Amino acid sequence: MLEVKNIKVELGGSNILNDVSLSVAAGELLSVVGPNGAGKSTLFSVMSGAFKPQAGSAFLEGRAMADWPAEALARRRAVLPQHSELTFPFRVLEVVLLGRSPHAGFSDQGKDLTIARLALLETETLHLVDRVYTTLSGGERQRVQLARVLTQIEFSDSDVKGRQVEQAVKETGGRFLLLDEPTSSLDPSHQHATLQAAVRACGRGIGVVAVLHDLNLAAMYADRIVMLKEGKVVAQGKPVEVLTEGLIETVFELPVSVMAHPRRGCPFVVAA
């Protein structure tokens, strides 16, 4: 399990996060939503172990994030930021294989290439494998970076939905994928493809945290949603429990109508 307990972050005299607690289990997709300035990115940084809060702690499998050796943590937790800067003329395969760096000494070239190829297939970027990364569009770069973090977290072809996730965690260790606005630079088709890949990662026993702006994408793909406002958790639960007209209007200051999605049955939000 990946969890944060009683997190408080204060920057420039302002409370960015105030007594925030939440968790994500192996095999679960948790979406974090909220308006601009709600504290989503700061919470993401705390959950990834990149930012130490003034109070509270982040834990991976019951162990404080700060107590994990960097390479061991990198083998269990992968992070996709909103923007990944890379200016060297690496080919796409080389970029994706960077995700295997924490596994040096624990893997071999054949395994690394197999995992990288699967990640490229998952992100629909295998046809770009020999392209120079800097020549790609913004959306293509984002999908290649997703392939890199899937490779880091050892995304394999072993689907554990047919057996207990708990047993898979015992065998491989809890693995977690943190995605910060992973669909922001993508066209609608690849937005869905990206989140479908995240769902398939959950099917392999990987816990996923996705910061999303699009409430309908969160409704369609998340097992649970955490809604933030002004640094506080105002609601968390299943999409149908969180995405209500009253709560969305209060948090986002936007009147909406919420109805059942015509095909999926999950909440579908439209501006009133």
Image (cartoon, grey):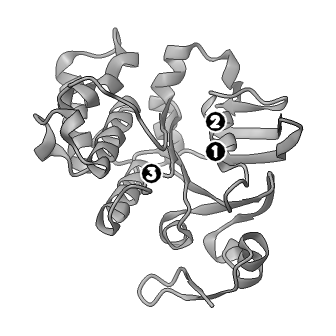
Q: Are marks 1 and 2 in contact (CB under 8 Å)?
A: yes
Image quadrant in which the N terminus is located = top right
Q: In the picture provided, is 61 more to the left or to the right than 191?
A: right
Callout 3, which amino acid? Answer: Pro
Question: What distance separates the C-alpha of mark 2 from that of mark 3?
Answer: 15 Å
Q: Residue at x 30, y 27 (%)?
A: 87
**Camera-nearest residue between 89 and 129:** 89
Q: Residue at x 42, y 57 (%)?
A: 183
Residue 96 spot, x, y in % from top left: 27, 31
Q: In the picture provided, is 172 more to the left or to the right than 44?
A: left
Residue 59's place in the image compared with 30, above or below, is above
Callout 1, which amino acid? Answer: Ser
Residue 245 spot, x, y in % from top left: 71, 84
Label 3 element class:
loop
**Camera-nearest residue between 229 and 160:** 229
**Quarter-of-image position of residue 114:** top left
Disc 1 designates what residue? 41
Which numbered dot is residue 182? Answer: 3
Label 2 element class:
helix
Disc 2 designates what residue? 45
Q: How many residues crowd around disc 2 within 10 Å: few (fewer than 14), some, or many (20 or more)?
A: some
